[in-house]
Image: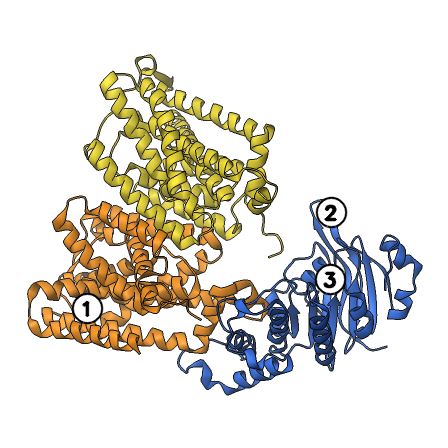
Chain colours: A blue, B orange, C yellow
Amino acid sequence: MGEALIETDGLTRRFGALAAVNGVSLAFETGRVHAVIGPNGAGKSTFLNLLSGELRATSGRVLLRGEDVTRASPDRLSRLGVGRAYQTANLFPEISSGDCVWLAAQSRLPSSMLFFRPAERYPQVGVRAARALEACGLSQRRSAIAGQLSYGEQRQLEIAMVLATDPSLLLLDEPLAGLGHDEALRIVALMREVAKGRTVILVEHDMDAVFSISDTVTVLVDGRVLVTGAPDEIRNSAAVRDAYLGGEVA
Amino acid sequence: MRRQALLLAAAAALAAVAFSGDRFWLQFLGKAMIGCILAIGLDLLVGFTGMVSLAHSAFFGLAAYALALLTNRLGLVNPLVTLPACIAFAAAAALVIGWLSLRATGVYFIMVTLAFTQMLYYLFNDSPALGGSDGLYVQARPVDSRVAAYVVIWLALIAVYLVLSRVLRAPYGRVLEGIRGNEQRMRSLGYPTRRYKLVAFVIAGATAGVAGYLDATLYGFVNPAQLGWRQSGLILVTVLLGGKGTLYGPAFGALLLAFIEHYGEKVTEHWNALIAALVIAVVLFLPRGLAGLLQGRPRG
Amino acid sequence: MSLSLFLVQLVNGVEYGLLLFLVASGLTLVFGVLGVLNFAHGSFYMLGAYLAWWVSARSGSLLLGIAIGLPAMVLIGLLVERLAIARLYSRDHLSQVLLTYGLVLLFNELQSVLFGNDVHGVDTPEALSWAVRLGEQTWPAWRAFTSLACICIAVAMRQIVLGTRFGMRVRAGASNPEMVEALGIDVRRLFATLFSAGTALAGLAGMLAAPLTTVYPGMGESVLILSFVVVVIGGIGSIKGAFFGALLVGLADTFGKVLLPGFASAMVYAVMAAVLLWRPRGLLGAAAEGR
């Protein structure tokens, strides 16, 4: 049993009368890939938004390395090592992919309140950016405008940007959504690489991918945790199958 | 390269006027260059950070009034003292107003800047002690000779342009660009964006302060009409006209507007309608402004 | 301050607030549903006033002026919406600010050319030219009529927004404009109707205010700014917010002018700053969800 890098305690988020996330208490072990799955409307994205600080919890707590970060802002969480990749392209559409990753890498400088030296003269930023691009197979596409990349390339850029922030915790929000088979395989391989030495929380619908790279799987239904366990347990669980309305889980 | 050549040519042409000694042109282009400084400062906010502010003229006016009060009440004229003091004053005001305004986002932000501008306008307009609607004369100007004032303005314009260009190439400038492109993403990447926006607001306010100081020096007169939202609106017009997000474009926009205002007045008494038509036409048909014509393709 | 003076200021403040509500409600709806920041809104107030004056000066009847002016304002609203505002729906804030700013300049010139730059008084209708007694002070009946009219309109608005299909679309549009379109509702017609309604309301406010403030160039400007303050305080898209915000601003302005003559104008902005520090989305605007 490893220790938890991040855990939630009775985390709840209401929208009016609806509790999208309802009393979720989960622990995410350091260095593991922990998938969160569930039928549509289960509250997975909301849960991720709560972890990344983009939504404020109605009640409950989020603890990062034991520290209460429930009310922390997204930028503070990022500086604490939480990296979030988004489901829909959340890039800087008008600049090049190289510049997108640069911005991500630059965020790791102690402060960007630097006014006099041109940005290129901070080599440590460039190195980090180049490494992230390389890791995601986008080095050749450095000068392409982000908004004009193909869908698959944009997902790669999304991950490259997060990588460039040197996160210890990666929040991946449906990274495979809308990808063709080959592209999906590529991203899965990328995720496997990226997961080494990091903690990953993966929200995904693609069950093949989930079961092939996850160490732990949690099933959310109607905002609550149904079960948490090893991939095989989940795959064979009748309760989980029922939750998906009788459909095949894997 | 084309852009560099154009800028150098324009700078040289403006400099040449200083030698002509022509009274009209010194005054007219001096005023126009002050408009350029205003436009460049506002472009930092609007074009590079994506913040539409209607408070720009307020900082212009505050610095101008500050000079008038410093010379009239305290007898301070020395530019080495008054210039930094007035800029600092404008920057401080920008810090306060910016901090308050940035508590609002989107259109709320725009409206809050509008309200603060009007508040300051009424403050100056309704206070007899501050000259009321008549304004104040600057009893002793920091720079007396017309030519010297022109040269100082020219130097200030070059300086402001160079400094801001520098800042925009630095890491800070990249952050602004990121904020303009996708502020929410910047936050999730770890940048406390509000802080950077506040700094941009203060920098812009300071440049507006420079312009205000120079204006008071050039004309020897300050009045509340320089502070209202209409003035801010006109500066915004120059930014759009010249091409926002280019830094040099708005400067040309300001020059163009100065010419249009001047000659428009001679052609028809309804020259305001002319400006209105121009503004509407630019918004609808030339949204990237003059610089857009020069560049041909979208920036990237 | 004597009690009757206080009472007069109180009802004046309420009346002013109610007029501001007419103007601000149009502004906040256009903002909230159409997503357009319209600086020319104050010009509609001015145009309404000028139209009412023009007709009443020639016919001797302000009420006729209002009867003719209202449909005229609706038409003007439709025209402006189709020709100019419709092009702003997908544009950025800067474009909206500048285009409507251009419209302000245009309308000002129009007013100057059509009506001249003199200040004009407008007579209240005979039937309402008396005054109500409030202690030693009097309160013009026209103000009472105006207040009543505004209240009726506010109630009618509430009914329409809460009780009709149209109102439902308006509310939907205020919270999620893209969805309204996706649902196949004729957005163009909705927007055109809403915009001209807002225009007419602003114009009506101008007509009602004309006898009280006289008709003069630039009269739209201060009303516009105050309306913005009302919308900021009350929250974009919220009619209820506009109502309470307008009353607050009306009272603050009226009492400010009496209690602190030099700083009256500043008082209103101070209230706005205070509200924003407490609630960055306005008193009744969408409460900051998440962040």
Label 2 marks which chain's residue? A
Q: Is residue C152 left or right of residue B133?
A: right
Q: Residue A61, labelled with which disc?
A: 3
Query: Is label 1 or label 3 in front?
Result: 3
The quadrant holding residue B146 is bottom left
User: In the figure, B47 relative to A246: above or below?
Assistant: below
* Residue C119 placement (x, y as % from top left): 21, 31
Dots 1 and 3: beta carbons under 8 Å? no
Of the pair C263 and C184, the residue shown nearer to us: C184
Q: Earlier in the sequence, mark 2 or mark 3?
A: 2
What amino acid type is highlighted by mark number 3?
A: Arg
Side of A191 relative to B36 (left or right): right
Q: Residue furthest top?
A: C127
**Closer to us: mark 2 or mark 3?**
2
- Residue C21 x/y as whole percent: 44, 34
The number of discs equals 3
The residue under label 1 is: B76
Quadrant assignment for the N terminus of chain C: top left
Residue under circle 2? Answer: A18
Q: Callout 1 environment at 10 Å: few (<14), some (14 to 19), or many (20+)?
A: some
B275, above or below B250, in the image: above
Query: Would you say A243 lies left or right of B106 here?
Result: right
Along the line of sight, the residue nearer the viewer: C273 or C93: C93
Residue B256: percent from the left, percent from the top? 22, 60
